[in-house]
Image (tube, rainbow, N blue to C red):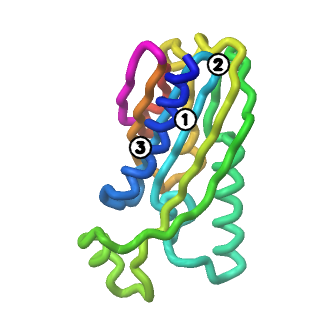
Amino acid sequence: MRQLLAWASLVVAGSTIAQGQTAHVHGAAQMSVALIDSALEIALYAPAESFWGFEYAAKSTEEIAAEQKALATLKSGSWLVLPSSAGCTLVTNSAARSDGGADDAEHSREHAGEASSAHTNVEVNLQFTCTQADDLTQLNAIELRLFATFASLDTVDLQGITDTKQLAKRLTNQDFKFGL
């Protein structure tokens, strides 16, 4: 099982890296989830605009506060509701902005009038240990509250893997629950 957990971790990390090479789409995020034994790993990747409303470097006090608040919320994992029966404990977490190149031509045209059209993204990683991880596999066991928390976010493309199956699903503000 430890080999599978290592493989699943690579899938989640690799997926996040690969997503950095895909089109930068405002209002859309990608999320990778791996559940192996008692370990649950989540990686979330999206344009910064989806979380704090702009992509350029924060300048004003209000912009800095908006960015810091969004990053703190994302890092906390409070936007993810796991069933209490699963007994999950957050063991590691990170949320950071990353600046990418402006290699998406349509996106660059969209921001042509701005001082900088560089893509700013957000990368979030959460790791949990769960005492009853099987409870996460129930239909609609996990609730994603990103849409209620961040109004600019429209879709989250989910990829999930467990030691017995794979999952792909598009989550929206109307369909925001899933089980692994």
Q: Do tag 2 and tag 3 residues touch (Cβ < 8 Å)?
A: no
Residue 163: x and y in percent read: 47, 16
Q: Do tag 3 and tag 1 residues touch (Cβ < 8 Å)?
A: no
> Residue at (35%, 78%) from the top-left corner?
111
Main secondary structure of the magenta stretch: strand
Please tell me whether residue 121 is drawn above or below residue 5 in the rendered image. Answer: below
- The image quadrant that residue 89 belongs to is top right
- Disc 1 target residue: 144
- Disc 2 target residue: 38
**Residue extending farthest left:** 105
* Kind of residue at disc 3: Ser
Magenta range is 163-170
Image disc number at residue 83: none
Please tell me whether residue 86 is drawn above or below residue 61 in the rendered image. Answer: above
* Kind of residue at disc 1: Leu
Tell me the distance, in whole angstroms, between the alpha carbons under discs 2 and 3: 21 Å
The residue carrying pointer 1 sits among few (fewer than 14), some (14 to 19) or many (20 or more) residues within 10 Å by Cα, namely: many
Residue 128: x and y in percent read: 67, 30
Please tell me whether residue 171 is drawn above or below residue 39 in the rendered image. Answer: below
**Residue extending farthest front:** 3
The residue carrying pointer 2 sits among few (fewer than 14), some (14 to 19) or many (20 or more) residues within 10 Å by Cα, namely: some
Name the foreground residue: 19 vs 80. 19
Q: Is residue 124 left or right of residue 11?
A: right
* Kind of residue at disc 2: Ser
Query: Which type of secondary structure does the marked residue at label 3 adopt?
Result: helix
Residue 122: x and y in percent read: 53, 58
